Image (cartoon, grey):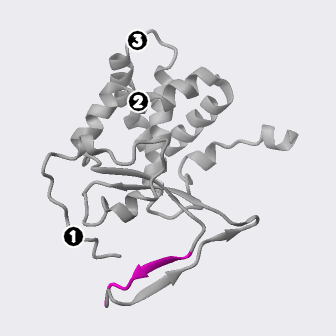
Amino acid sequence: VREYTSMHKACFYGRCLGFQFSPTLRPFLQTVVISMVSFGESYGKQQSGLGMAAFSFLTSGKYVIDPELRGAEFERITQNLDMKFWKSFWNLTESELLSGLASIASNLVQLNLTLTIPPEPLRLPLASDPRLFASVSPPVAHWGPGPVNMRLISYELREGQDSEELLAFSRTEAPPISLSLVPFGAQKHPPSPWL
């Protein structure tokens, strides 16, 4: 444990960040770490939320250009800042500014469905011949078959996503479908060609 605490960890958060993951995941990890170190630099200064966001945005460029600086700053943040920093950083996504930017930069979610699939075999029609069915057995873990909790999120309402059969699996503690985001008279798109 003593060896771990004295080891320099900055190299893992600089140029080598996310080397063990798929290359498609690395830009996302870099974005999170750059956001975190930029926010950490302005954290504790008496600024408004907008001022802190602007300062973080302006200082993020140096962490994009210099991965070693990013790694060193990330190591400093993880070792020295308190729990209030982590709470305020992860709550940034709840701010009105970022949620407004997200609605500008990306598609709105039209379907947000919370499902619980029971531990029973599912019979699904084949795409090539809907009269024929394939049976999918339930997953089995250490304790035997159990229900699978999942969430179906789609930016397009597709054919069958609001069917009675699918809504029968929806969990009761959350609203089953976010119809408030679906425009009135929204056209249903055909099933995904990738299924």
Residue that appears at 60% across and 67% down: 119
Location of residue 152 in the rendering, given as x and y in whole percent from the top left corner: 40, 57
Can you tell which quarter of the image residue 181 is in?
Answer: top left
Location of residue 191 in the rendering, given as x and y in whole percent from the top left corner: 26, 71
Magenta segment includes 152: no
Residue annotated with mark 2: 94
Q: Which one is earlier in the sequence, the residue at label 3 or at label 2?
A: 3
Q: How far apart are the alpha carbons under marks 3 and 2?
A: 18 Å
Q: How crowded is mark 1: few (under 14 residues within 10 Å), some or many (20 or more)?
A: few
Residue annotated with mark 1: 190
Q: Residues within 10 Å of mark 2 (few under 14, many from 20)?
A: few
Residue that appears at 47% across and 28% down: 91
Location of residue 110 in the rendering, given as x and y in whole percent from the top left corner: 27, 50
Q: Tell whether 180 sits left or right of 87.
A: left
Residue annotated with mark 3: 47
Location of residue 164 in the rendering, given as x and y in whole percent from the top left corner: 34, 61
Q: Residue 22 carries which label?
A: none
Q: In this view, does 40 lie above or below 140?
A: above
Q: Is residue 71 above or below residue 18?
A: above
Q: Which of marks 1 and 2 is in front?
A: 1
Q: Could you tell me which secondary element the residue under label 3 belongs to? A: loop
Residue range of the region highlighted in magenta in the rendering:
121-128
Q: Residues within 10 Å of mark 3 (few under 14, many from 20)?
A: few
Q: How far apart are the alpha carbons under marks 1 and 2?
A: 33 Å
Q: In this view, does 162 lie above or below 56?
A: below
Q: Tell whether 55 sits left or right of 82.
A: left
Disc 1 marks which amino acid?
Pro
